[in-house]
Image (cartoon, rainbow, N blue to C red):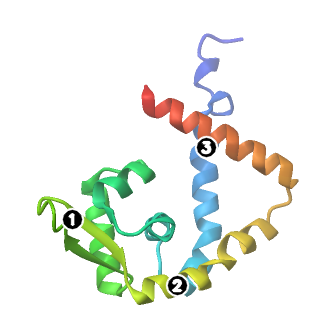
């Protein structure tokens, strides 16, 4: 065993997570193309389908993204007519992001996306559920570091 074995790609935790993320997004893309969404836009929509309106900060906190990363995503989604931006009546410094009728209607079409993706994965459902649970624990722990 070499002192540099720790640097072997096969010994890394970060690489399979990174590569899996890229592969998953690539598999999502044909379904998202039908919705006229990129993967980051899809994530924003999922957060807003849970609760709308939300501030940019609230969306960023849910997605672990900074507002400077979210701003161009939100601008493109406004142009597509899925969301709208308004100032909070109580605090003009806050910007609220709200689903439009088109954004709400997209939710029904998006129902098939996770189902279609899961149908193409040959891993038992209980393993996928365990993996999701572990990844959420990993993510929330890493955010605290």
* Residue 57, horizontal then vertical, whole percent: 29, 53
Q: Nearer the viewer, mark 1 or mark 3?
A: 1
Q: Is residue 139 above or below residue 114?
A: above
* Residue 94, horizontal then vertical, whole percent: 18, 60
Q: Spatial distance from mark 1 to mark 3, Cα to Cα?
A: 33 Å
Task: Answer with mark 1 or mark 3, whichever residue precedes in sequence.
Answer: 3
Q: Circle 2 is placed at which residue position?
A: 106
Task: Characterize the local packing of mark 1: few (<14), some (14-19) or many (20 or more) Cα atoms within 10 angstroms.
Answer: some
Q: Spatial distance from mark 2 to mark 3, Cα to Cα?
A: 29 Å
Which image quarter is the N terminus in? top right
Q: Secondary structure at mark 2?
A: helix
Residue drawn at point x = 44 percent, y = 34 percent: 143
Q: Is residue 63 above or below residue 48?
A: above
Which image quarter is the C terminus in? top left
Q: Circle 1 is placed at which residue position?
A: 95
**Of residues 99 and 8, the one drawn nearer to the viewer in this rendering:** 99
* Residue 140, horizontal then vertical, whole percent: 52, 36
Q: Circle 3 is placed at which residue position?
A: 17
Task: Answer with mark 2 or mark 3, whichever residue precedes in sequence.
Answer: 3
């Amino acid at each position: 065993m070499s002192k540099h074995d720790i640097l072997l790609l096969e010994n890394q935790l970060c690489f399979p997570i990174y590569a899996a993320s890229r592969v998953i997004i690539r598999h999502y893309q044909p379904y998202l193309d039908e919705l006229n969404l990129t993967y980051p836009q899809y994530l924003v929509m999922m957060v807003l389908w849970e609760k709308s309106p939300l501030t940019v900060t609230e969306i960023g906190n849910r997605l672990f993204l900074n507002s400077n990363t979210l701003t161009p995503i939100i601008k493109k989604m406004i142009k597509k007519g899925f969301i709208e931006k308004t100032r909070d009546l109580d605090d003009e410094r806050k910007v609220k992001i709200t689903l439009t009728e088109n954004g709400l209607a997209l939710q029904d079409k998006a129902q098939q996306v996770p189902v279609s993706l899961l149908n193409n994965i040959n891993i038992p459902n209980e393993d996928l559920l365990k993996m999701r649970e572990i990844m959420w624990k990993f993510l929330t722990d890493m955010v605290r570091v």
